[in-house]
Amino acid sequence: MLLHLVLAVVAIGAVIGIAYLVCYGGFEGPVDWAMHTSSHGSRDARQIALTFDDGPDPERTPAMLDALAALDVKATFFVLGSSVDAHPELCARILREGHELGNHTYHHRYLPLTRSRDVERELVATDLAILRATGTVPTIARPPYGGRSPWTVRAFARVAKRLVLWDINSFDWKGAPSDDVARRVLDQARPGSIILMHDARRGRAGKKPSTTVEAVRLLVPELQARGYDLVTVSHLAA
Ligand code: NI
């Protein structure tokens, strides 16, 4: 009886572990090797892409855009359709200032648990929101939490989106001070890196809004001193 219980727990743990490995973002897995998702650019070109997820946010996005303009670098913003509909003028400003827009779905759901038809709806609704705000449609998309599965990836392909992940997670949302966030990124930075940061905060409120902006102000000059160009995701050498 006890043995059966132990075996059942081990089996359930193994299934969850394998599902996590196959579907969850942050590191490459079998889904990526089979389906050509991008977690970094060419390792031979000294280029790095800064990416900001979950905006546009009326408080944080303008501050980030001001900082990027002062540093004179371009970045990529993976926006939520629901936030674009709430703040279309901010979405337009991102594009007008030379940055790239990417589709981050409409409601920020965990897609491996979402029906394929609904994944497609999430992407299309966000394309339409961006189209209304800017007159353009992005060519790249990033699934919330990096969550992906073979059927998710196929839904991205059906709406003509290149699925873009990251190879450096700044964990800027966790509440560490900005110099720790910058240090974590600098320790891992290498040619072709795609850095995950955020210009909005979902869920629990209260973490300092300026952390990511301050981290970017620390990071960018240091990366440039190391000879890196900061480019948009679509400008990263393939
Ligand atoms: Ni997100």
Image (cartoon, helix red, strand yellow):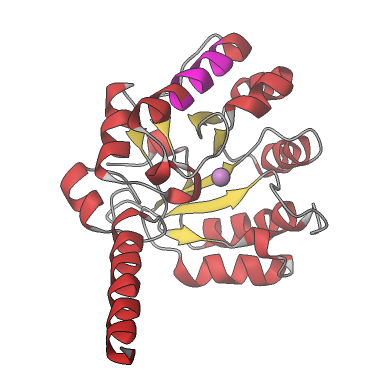
In the rendered image, which quarter contains the C terminus? top left
133 or 125: which is nearer to us?
A: 125
Q: Farthest residue toward the bottom?
A: 2
Residue 97 in view, yes or no:
no
- The x, y position of residue 118, in whole percent, is 42, 27
Residue at image position (72%, 41%) is 70
Residue span colored magenta: 122-131
Residue at image position (27%, 38%) is 151
Number of numbered callouts drawn:
0
Q: Is residue 84 left or right of residue 236?
A: right
Q: Main secondary structure of the magenta part?
A: helix
Residue at image position (56%, 70%) is 184
- The x, y position of residue 193, in whole percent, is 41, 55
Q: Is residue 216 left or right of residue 6?
A: right
In the rendered image, which quarter contains the N terminus? bottom left
Q: Is 123 a magenta residue?
A: yes
